[in-house]
Amino acid sequence: MGSAEIVVAHGIWRFLSGIVSYVPVQISVIGASNTGKTTLDKQLTTQGEIRELGEGERTHHTKGWLGTYKLPETTKKRVKSDGLAKTLVSRDLGGHIEYHSTWLRDMVDRNCNTVIVVVDHRHLVNPNNVDNQTALGYLVNALQKKTKPKGLSLRGRWRWKNYAPRRVIVLANKADEWMDMEAHKEWEKGFIARHKIFDAFREDLHQLQSMYIPVYTDTISARYGWNVQDAIMKGFDI
């Protein structure tokens, strides 16, 4: 193939990649309350420093007449990294325990092939706090037991038994608060998965892999936009 043909082929590839990047990709973003899911949602919608949210701004849901929680509307986000881009579709879901079944209903109904689990460092500050472990554990247990959430759409009822995400991305948020120089060196070398912040989740991550669901781990600061888009795009590579 001559140089001219290579240039033309590369141009065609970039053109097609650009078109594909606008095809909506359904993702589910879950995690315990106050881990930064809403902040991440805002960061992906409009980049820049996000102001700290107050307790009254935490995501909550009301129940409908059937007794199931109403889901907020989905929104589209544009994520770019290293010249590549994706259009993501997600919902800002609450992190309280009573909303866990809502996570599963949403990801099954929309057939989300990517689940992003947002955690923070609260279990390092207080070893007795298991909020992060409970959130990830719910996902793993539900996928293992093929749990059927309430309120599924007709399409969701048809697919729930065979549903499984194609990948799980675990993002340790608030790196601006817990990441020290040693942790940053690990991250630069590509070894952040070895950091102690992920130790509490290793059994659940191994369980996901035993179900043939690959897992990507990384760290971000959703409030300041650090490594957010790069981490998500890298997660899609697994």
Image (cartoon, rainbow, N blue to C red):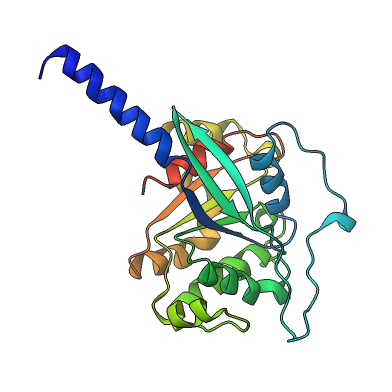
Q: Is the residue 180 above or below the residue 218 in the image?
A: above
> In the rendered view, does 221 fall on the left or right side of 109?
right
| Residue lying farthest to the left in this orientation | 1
The residue shown at (51%, 33%) is 80
- State the residue in front, 125 or 214: 214
Query: Is 86 above or below relative to 137?
Result: above
Q: Is residue 191 visible?
A: no
Left or right: residue 19 versus residue 52 is left
The image shows residue 148, relative to residue 22, as above or below, that is below
* Image x and y of residue 46, in percent: 70, 36
Give the x, y percent position of residue 101. 63, 77
Can see residue 181?
yes
Q: Residue at the top extreme?
A: 3
Q: Count the labels in the image.
A: 0
* Residue at 43 percent of width and 64 percent of height: 165
- Give residue 26's position: percent from left, percent from top: 51, 56
Q: Position of residue 64 (x, y in %)?
A: 77, 80
Q: Quadrant of the N terminus?
A: top left
Q: Is residue 189 left or right of residue 125?
A: left
Front in this rendered view, residue 179 or 25: 25
